[in-house]
Image (cartoon, rainbow, N blue to C red):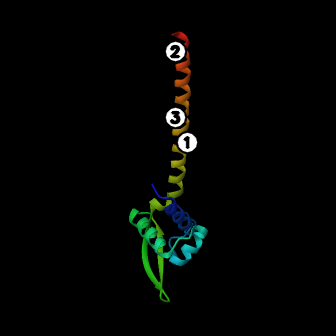
Amino acid sequence: MLSIREQKVMQILYKESANKSAILISPTDLSIMLGQDNFSISQVEKLVKDLNTDGYFDLVYSDRRGETVYCISLTNKGKGFLRDKKLLKRNLIYRLVLSVSFAILSFIIGLILKRLF
């Protein structure tokens, strides 16, 4: 399961790589796209490296006028990122509804048993 910061990075990379085989993006551009969360470049580099290790995309380091640039191509796991996120949300809601249903059922059974005895 990805952390909130990793999810934000993956959302940006997923959105940028829509209908493309690979994208070029620098750590500073990625930090700017993350917006007001104040990600430092070293934090962005660590997040990108961790996501690459987890297999969400293939990462190649490149150099553009002295600046490090990432060449990122999503793997199947990365392409299924949004689907996995939706499934996780659906499973969470299902478990919540199931827990509430069992709590209500046990309350009703408790009331019935209280009246009987």
- Residue type at numbered disc 2: Leu
Q: Give the residue drawn at x 50%, y 58%.
A: 81
Query: Which residue is under mark 3?
Result: 99
Q: Amino acid at mark 1?
A: Ile
In this orientation, does residue 25 appear?
no
Q: What residue is pinned by disc 1?
A: 93
Question: Label 3 neighbourhood size at 10 Å, few (<14), some (14-19), many (20+)?
Answer: few
Label 2, label 3: how far apart the Cα atoms are: 21 Å
The three-letter code of the residue at mark 3 reads Ser
Quarter placement of the N terminus: bottom left
Q: Look at discs 1 and 3 and give the one toward the viewer.
A: 3
Residue 96, image x, y percentages = 54, 39
Numbered tag placed on residue 113 in the rendering:
2
Could you tell me which residue is drawn at 51 percent across and 70 percent down?
21
Q: Nearer the viewer, mark 1 or mark 2?
A: 2
Residue 89 to residue 3: above or below: above
State how far apart marks 1 and 3 are (Cα).
10 Å
Q: Could you tell me residue 69's position as x and y percent? A: 48, 80
Q: Residue furthest right?
A: 36
Q: Residues within 10 Å of mark 2 (few under 14, many from 20)?
A: few
| Proximity of marks 1 and 2: CB atoms separated by less than 8 Å | no
Who comes first in sequence, dot 1 or dot 2?
Answer: 1
Up-down relation of residue 21 to residue 117 (above or below): below
Q: Earlier in the sequence, mark 2 or mark 3?
A: 3
Taking 90 as reference, is 52 above or below it? Answer: below
- Of residues 12 and 20, which is closer to you in this image? 12
Q: Is residue 113 visible?
A: yes
Report how far apart the C-alphas of labels 1 and 2 lie in the structure.
30 Å
